[in-house]
Image (cartoon, helix red, strand yellow):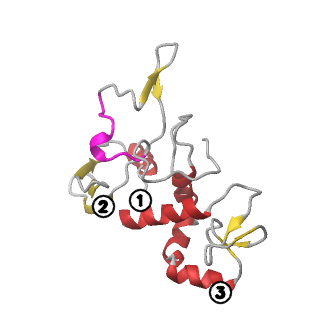
Amino acid sequence: MATQAKPQSFQDREFFPSFSDCPLEYSWDDRYLVERGDATVVNRKHWCLLGDIIHVSTFARLRVVAKDHKGDTFVVGFYVDDLNDMLRMQKEFKIIPLGLKDAIKMNEQVLKYTVAEGTQRKCHGCDNVKMNINACAGCTLFYYCNKDCQAKAWKEKEHKKFCKILSREDIKLTHFLKYETYDASVSFE
């Protein structure tokens, strides 16, 4: 699976569409599918539907009601007869333990403070740019001049809320996946 050094914006609607812009299950969509030379159809790119979960029910089957970035409500229903299929689907259905607005806020900070290897880093606390500063021991994405800067970001930039979430490799992957290049299905284990 291809990852990239530069994070992807959750507000890029090409890769993070609203529910109404997602591909339909049984129809062709050039934005999401491409035909190879041997007449097989493959995905053109990775994409991810983000939404706020507003209701979950498990009466007959797992059913999730959510709202997308436009505020439109959609339903995700899990219709499987085999327990193995349910386990496979759970890997593709990732829950970020934040509301959509906070997930976008977290992503904006990742975009602002994550730089390419070998370049100067921006302190997440004071915004000064330096070469030799220390990474957060939890998420390893943000850097700090000293403990005062780390404490400032912990409080003022809500790193306390985001650090544990960003330390999960599957959540990091949602930021750093090379969305424009589909090379295989992604499993968020």
Q: Going 73% across and 73% down the picture, which residue do you hit?
A: 134
Amino acid type of the residue tagged 1 in the rendering: Ile
Q: Is residue 97 visible?
A: no
Q: Say if the magenta span includes residue 148.
A: no
Q: Going 48% across and 40% down the picture, which residue do you hit?
A: 46
Q: Going 56% across and 47% down the picture, which residue do you hit?
A: 177
Nearer the observer: mark 3 or 2; the answer is: 3
Whole-percent x, y for residue 41 in the image: 45, 22
Q: Which residue is mark 2?
A: 53
141 or 41, nearer to the observer:
141
Amino acid type of the residue tagged 2 in the rendering: Ile
Mark 1 crowd level (few <14, some 14–19, many ≥20, 10 Å Cα): some
Query: Are the residues tagged 1 and 2 within 8 Å (C-beta)?
Result: yes
On the rendered image, what quadrant is the N terminus found in? top right
163 or 89, nearer to the observer:
163
> Rounded to the nearest whole Å, what is the CA distance between mark 3 and mark 2?
36 Å
Asked whether, in this view, residue 144 is left or right of residue 85, the answer is right
Sequence order check, earlier mark of 1 and 2: 2
Badge 1 element:
loop
Residues in magenta, as a range: 16-26
Mark 2 crowd level (few <14, some 14–19, many ≥20, 10 Å Cα): some
Mark 3 crowd level (few <14, some 14–19, many ≥20, 10 Å Cα): few
> Rounded to the nearest whole Å, what is the CA distance between mark 1 and mark 3?
32 Å
Q: Which residue is mark 1?
A: 95
Q: Say if the magenta span includes residue 23.
A: yes
Q: Which residue is mark 3?
A: 148
Sequence order check, earlier mark of 1 and 3: 1
Query: Are the residues tagged 3 and 2 within 8 Å (C-beta)?
Result: no
